[in-house]
Amino acid sequence: MPRLAGKIAWITGAGSGIGEAAALALADEGATTVLTGRTAEKLDRVAARIRQQGGEAYVQPAELTDAKQVQAIGAFIGKTLGRLDILVNNAGVNIVDRHWDKLTPEGIDELVHGNLSQALYCVTVALPLMRAQKDGLLIHTASIAGRVVGGFPGPIYSAAKHGVVAMSHSINMQECINGIRSTVFLPGEVATPILDKRPNPVGPEERARMVQSEDCGDLIRYIACLPKHVVMSEVMLAPTHNRTYIANLQQKL
Ligand SMILES: NC(=O)c1ccc[n+]([C@@H]2O[C@H](COP(=O)([O-])OP(=O)(O)OC[C@H]3O[C@@H](n4cnc5c(N)ncnc54)[C@H](OP(=O)(O)O)[C@@H]3O)[C@@H](O)[C@H]2O)c1
């Protein structure tokens, strides 16, 4: 018996990378999935893969930095599916010109809205549905950059992801009385299309040694299947071949 049969899971950023892998893993456990991202064709492709493996998927494209579009998906879920059990709050962005010497107000807005505001909007839509059930799980993809301020992710991405970490813990503090649980997931480098926005290109050999999307999908499946009386508040997943550690070792300070 699939462990998530009868559950409804909404996955943002579901058209590629970690979100795609999470959608496939949750569908494989029997969850009905709602797939959101800006590009309908990418979501259609993931929905087709889910249906091929016998699962159920609804494609709901949206620009998540627009609160009204987020609310429309919440209304669709409430009306059509009647409940929401799991939100994988995963969509996020980075930009090439991410360091202080190149940052513009437009770039700052893209990073803050694209990583933090939209994640907050999704939470405000998910919580009323979950409160009504006295049950619900939110899994937010932040980043190790949301815990440790480092070099390559850039200062605004790091600041926004710190915000996502704080958001997740605050949900547990205020919503535990409603049976709602919140997990913040902090990946290190994962081989996904977001790497194409790095100022320094990342080659195939480097990508092969990173965490893979499927590793994240497996972890998200594990978290989603935990019993209701426990919450995994925070979890990190990093590559063994950690390029930051290796760069530090090579400096031989
Ligand atoms: N890969 C890594 O090394 C790494 C490390 C730490 C954290 N993360 C985080 O992991 C999450 C998933 O990223 P990924 O690595 O899987 O990269 P990805 O393949 O680029 O996935 C990001 C997804 O988010 C969607 N998206 C972005 N902005 C959106 C918006 N405003 N509205 C709706 N959808 C939006 C994108 O689809 P559309 O462009 O079609 O909208 C895309 O499918 C992100 O939050 C990222 O910050 C990644």
Image (cartoon, helix red, strand yellow):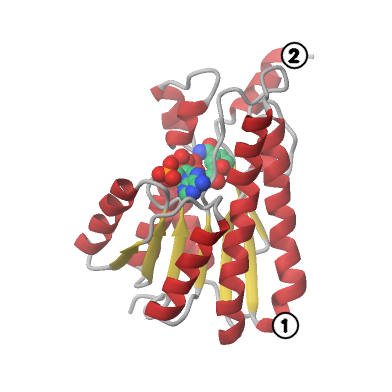
How far across and how far down the image is residue 109, in percent? 65, 38
* Mark 2 / mark 1, whichever is N-terminal: 1
Towards the viewer: 154 or 103:
103
**Residue at the limit of the structure toward the left, as seen here:** 52
Provide residue 199's location: percent of width, then percent of height: 55, 20
Instruction: Reply above or below: 88 against 9.
Output: above
Taking the image as shown, residue 121 lies to the left or right of residue 90, namely right
Task: Say which amino acid is labelled 1.
Answer: Ile
Q: Residue at x 46, y 25 (%)?
A: 206
Q: Which residue is mark 1?
A: 177
Locate residue 247, reporting x and y percent: 65, 20
Quadrant location of residue 177?
Answer: bottom right
In the structure shown, which secondary structural element does the residue marked by tag 2 occupy? loop
Q: In the rendered view, does 146 fall on the left or right side of 126? A: right
Quadrant location of the C terminus?
top right
Judging by the rendered image, the residue that carries numbered circle 2 is: 252
Label 1's element? Answer: helix
Binning the other alpha carbons within 10 Å of mark 2 as few (below 14), some (14 to 19) or many (20 upward) gives: few
State whether label 2 is within 8 Å of ligand 1: no
Front residue of 222/197: it is 197
Asked whether 204 or 45 is in front, the reply is 45
The location of residue 197, given as percent across then percent down, is 50, 27
- Locate the N terminus by quadrant: bottom left
| Residue 89, quarter of picture | bottom right
Seen in the picture, residue 18 relative to 72 is either above or below; the reply is: above
